[in-house]
Amino acid sequence: MAPTPVTVADAPQLPFLVRFRLKGTPWIPILILLLIIVAAMGGESIAPHDPNGLDLGAAFRPPFWQAGGSYDYLLGTDNLGRDVLSRIIAGARVSAIVVLYAIGFSGAIGTMLGIMAGYFGGIVDMIIVRITEIMMAIPTLALALIFTATMDPGLSTVIIVIVLTYWTWYARIIRSEILSLRERDYVAFAKVAGCGPVTIFLRHLVPNIFNTLVVLMTLQVGQVIIFEASLSFLGVGIQPPDTSWGLMLADARQYITYAWWGITMPGIAIILTCLSSNLIGDWLRDLLDPKRRQL
């Protein structure tokens, strides 16, 4: 007897791992992000050269496929003879640290405020919504420049600035989710059973917004990386001797006419990372949302 074929209508009932196999998994973006993660974890230990090692005699070496290039410097060198590939690998660690801390803290703050606004309503909702609207009305980059002007530039400052400017995304979206969830029967039954707000938050609300949080965090990876690169490019973000992709762009911009690889290679790293995170975020949204789920 022939097996019954799996149809699109059966997708919501399939186990998660089965749906994972059946959907069009974006393997190339996943592979790119895995390479970035490996580079971030390995850092200088897997870089072919010291990212901050100066060698003026090897300055402006082109990539290996161009005339004058060398396999010792696969992606060329910058104006100080530093290996571009090694600096990209070192910059991946800085980007990963910024992404982990910034998204973690901004997600936690925004989620908590969104849950409180949506669940309690009334004056609590009004205050949180007004603060969120005020923060979102201010241009993000302008607000970041104000913060960085009052604090010493560096990695911790970049993380603080991103947290202060990105929590509003989570608060607004989570609030709208909670406004719908708080009217569900299981929340009403929990209240009748004597469960407090903290218990209801942890047992009934947070598990139901987990999918939304995963998608939001994945989609925000690219935004955070671009934001950090923008601050570093303007000179108010990551500072030497630390290495970041935005700082590499800033250092190489004046040599773009005759050393194009210095600004192109970190730019490609930023583009590939952001594009991969966005594609994976779209894929997770389709995979985790029953309304959008397809085989």
Image (cartoon, rainbow, N blue to C red):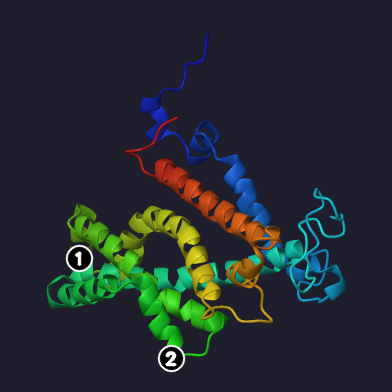
Q: What secondary structure is marked by label 1?
A: helix
* Residue 84 occupies quadrant: bottom right
Classify 157 as above or below 40: below
288 lies above or below 193: above
Of the two numbered discs 2 and 1 on the same chain, state the one appearing first in sequence.
2
- Asked if residue 86 is positioned above or below residue 65 in the image, the reply reads below
Residue 87, visible in the rendered structure? yes
Relative image position of residue 27 (x, y in whole percent): 60, 41
Closer to the camera in the image, 98 or 122: 98
Residue ranking furthest to the front: 257
Q: Residue 87 at what x, y percent from top left?
A: 72, 67
The residue shown at (80%, 50%) is: 66
Element marked by disc 2: helix
Q: Which residue is mark 1?
A: 191
Residue at 87 percent across and 59 percent down: it is 72
The residue carrying mark 2 is 150
Under mark 2, the amino acid is Thr
On the image, the x and y values in percent for residue 6 come to 45, 22
Residue in front for this viewpoint, 170 or 91: 91
Q: Position of residue 7 (x, y in %)?
A: 41, 22
Nearest to the observer: residue 269 or residue 23: 269
